[in-house]
Image (tube, helix red, strand yellow):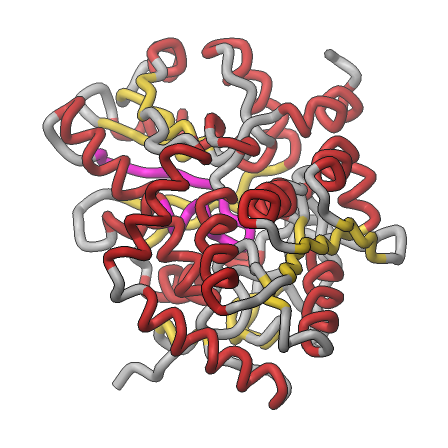
């Protein structure tokens, strides 16, 4: 028997009693709301007219020729309003909060894309917005900090200087405990206590639904493989979920950072162990005593020591294959896609560009590969330029 809120042995709700009742309220409210066709019609209206869905499935001919293998398609989530897939979930959750009578939204952000998307959705629906962001991430993503503030959000920077996404989540949860009556916490990925992994997944499933209908129209068959980067895991879940029962190979690419050494990467699936953090049981990077390990990634959005529990389940069951890409490989993928296709990717999906080429070569010319291009790279230009000084 599958326990409620679990994906196999992963998931759950490991929170203080105060939060338990807030999560129970959210779960019950969402269960009823998700059965209402009117809710999805309203959400789809905003996704279409405000966010810019559906996004194209683009045949990357130059990248395909370069790989000399399978046809490569890009799911262009980078073309969405605010620049990434995060807007799908932000609009959905802020709409829930509005219907629950909440007047204030809090959120955490790493690369800033979820923060920007949440600030945008709050402006749309007229709600107060507070975004927590690690000091180090804010330094790396200064432009996104300005964008959030421009749209009316308060951005609270989390010390110390090394603070990243994990620390921002900690502070956001502390805020939520003390402000439950009028505040909803918009978690940005498929992480956290139940029901957040399910809610976020449901709002990101539209990516895979569109891929399936678009590729059938373009090619008359399903793709042989779909690739996506994995930090917390929302864009990957969104791309993969509709294909779980099909024969399509599903491949997630984690941040391999500088290597496999302690504190040198953010590859929590392939290098992590089972643990509990941020209200969930999942796979986390830990030391020998079970303490959460420091992380590193050139990409702020992948710099997290854990992964969503459903991804941990997919890894344990073998349904999804997970690879690692180093900082250097991400930079190379960033530059290659920019040069060959005129498309500048965010550093997060840039981790999967070279792996997509490898898979395309392995599968051969009669096959089809889709890369979920989850965000655009305007925010990362300075990081790439400073990495090797070549731009």
Whether 43 is drawn above or below 32: the answer is above
Specify start and end residues of the magenta stretch as a single range.
223-238
Q: Where is residue 141 in the image (x, y as percent from the top left)?
A: 74, 36
* Residue 98 included in the magenta stretch of the image: no
Q: Which residue is at the front of the view, 68 or 136? A: 136
Q: In this view, does 289 lie to the left or right of 275?
A: right
The reply, left or right, for residue 376 in relation to residue 131 is left
Name the spot of residue 120 as percent of width and height, x first. Answer: 59, 41
Question: Compared with residue 277, is residue 18 higher up or lower down, i.e. above or below?
Answer: below
Q: In this view, does 117 lie to the left or right of 389?
A: left
Return the residue nearer the eye: 304 or 14.
Answer: 14
Residue extending furthest left? 220
Q: In terms of image quadrants, where is residue 27?
A: bottom left
Quarter of the picture holding the N terminus:
bottom left
Q: Quadrant of residue 380?
A: top right
Residue shown at the point (56%, 69%) measured from the top left: 273
- Magenta stretch contains residue 233: yes
Closest to the observer, 159 or 311: 159
| Residue 261 visible in this rendered orientation of the protein | yes
């Amino acid at each position: 028997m599958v326990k409620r809120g679990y994906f196999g042995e992963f998931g759950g709700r490991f929170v203080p009693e105060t939060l338990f009742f807030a999560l129970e309220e959210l779960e019950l409210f969402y269960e009823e709301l998700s059965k209402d066709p009117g809710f999805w019609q309203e959400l789809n209206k905003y996704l279409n007219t405000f966010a810019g869905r559906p996004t194209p499935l683009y045949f990357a001919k130059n990248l395909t020729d370069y790989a000399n293998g399978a046809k490569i398609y890009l799911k262009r989530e980078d073309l969405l309003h605010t620049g990434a897939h995060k807007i799908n979930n932000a609009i959905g959750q802020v709409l829930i909060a509005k219907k629950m009578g909440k007047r204030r939204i809090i959120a955490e952000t790493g690369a800033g894309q979820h923060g920007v998307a949440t600030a945008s959705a709050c402006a749309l629906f007229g709600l107060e917005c507070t975004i927590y962001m690690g000091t180090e991430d804010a330094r790396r993503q200064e432009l996104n900090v300005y964008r959030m503030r421009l749209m009316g959000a308060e951005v609270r920077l989390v010390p110390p200087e090394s603070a990243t996404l994990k620390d921002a989540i900690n502070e956001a949860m502390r805020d939520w405990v003390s402000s439950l009556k009028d505040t909803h916490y918009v978690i940005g990925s498929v992480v956290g206590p139940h029901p957040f992994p399910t809610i976020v997944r449901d709002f990101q499933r539209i990516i895979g639904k569109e891929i399936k209908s678009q590729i059938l129209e373009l090619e008359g068959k399903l793709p042989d493989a779909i690739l996506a980067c994995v930090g917390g895991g929302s864009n990957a879940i969104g791309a993969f979920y509709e294909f779980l029962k099909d024969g399509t190979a599903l491949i997630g690419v984690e941040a391999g950072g500088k290597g496999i050494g302690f504190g040198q990467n953010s590859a929590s699936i392939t290098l992590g162990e089972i643990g509990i953090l941020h209200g969930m049981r999942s796979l986390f990077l830990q030391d020998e005593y079970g303490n959460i390990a420091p992380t590193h990634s050139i990409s702020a959005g992948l710099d997290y020591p854990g992964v969503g529990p459903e991804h941990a389940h997919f890894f344990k069951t073998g349904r999804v294959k997970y690879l690692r890409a180093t900082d250097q490989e991400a930079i190379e993928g960033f530059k290659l896609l920019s040069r060959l296709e005129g498309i500048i990717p965010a550093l997060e999906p840039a981790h999967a560009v070279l792996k997509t080429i490898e898979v395309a070569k392995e599968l051969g010319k009669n096959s089809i590969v889709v890369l979920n291009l989850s965000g655009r790279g305007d925010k990362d230009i300075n990081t790439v330029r400073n990495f090797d000084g070549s731009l």
